[in-house]
Image (tube, rainbow, N blue to C red):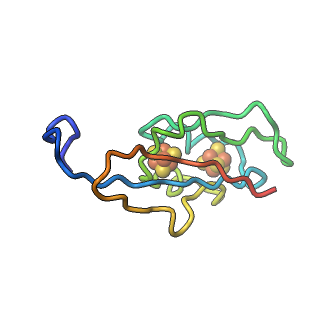
Amino acid sequence: MIPYSELSPDAEIEILEGKLAIVKDLCKGCSFCIEFCPKHVLAISKDFNKKGYHPPVVKEAMACSNCKLCEYYCPEFAIYTPAGSEKKKPKQKSTVVAKEVRHE
Ligand code: SF4
Ligand code: SF4
């Protein structure tokens, strides 16, 4: 992958649009997803879930690169990027978008 800083100003780039799903009541509050996110997208919620833990919340949605590390590290399958959430947007300097999806 070429770093953005090495792209010419008129380069055509493809950006992935990410979407996060957080099933807050499955979360056991281990914070793995928060600690291992390379983009610091997540933070601990002040709210409690049904088990009495603090689930993660999205704090920097625009920073998400859809790398799926949070999904891989979660031992409870409580956070994931839904299938089809990677949409390539060629020929535009779009930003990366992450949405928090809650399943109540
Ligand atoms: S997909 Fe990657 S960048 Fe996005 S929240 Fe998860 S670990 Fe962070
Ligand atoms: S890794 Fe999973 S169980 Fe741990 S805090 Fe994140 S969502 Fe909750």
- Residue drawn at (52%, 50%) of the image: 70
Image height check: is 96 above or below 42? below
- Residue drawn at (45%, 62%) of the image: 86
Between 70 and 91, the one nearer to me in the picture? 91
Between 1 and 38, the one nearer to me in the picture? 1
Image height check: is 43 above or below 92? above
Residue 88, image x and y in percent? 37, 61
Residue at the bottom extreme? 83
Quadrant position of the C terminus in the picture: bottom right
Q: How many marks?
A: 0
Residue 66, image x and y in percent? 44, 52
Query: Would you say 66 lies left or right of 45 here?
Result: left
Residue 32 lies in what quarter of the image?
top right
Image height check: is 84 above or below 66? below
Image height check: is 20 above or below 58? below
Between 72 and 84, the one nearer to me in the picture? 84
Residue 95, image x and y in percent? 41, 43
- Residue drawn at (16%, 41%) of the image: 7
- Residue drawn at (80%, 35%) of the image: 47
Residue 15, image x and y in percent? 35, 52
Residue at the top extreme? 46
Residue 38 lies in what quarter of the image?
top left
Query: Would you say 87 lies left or right of 50 here?
Result: left
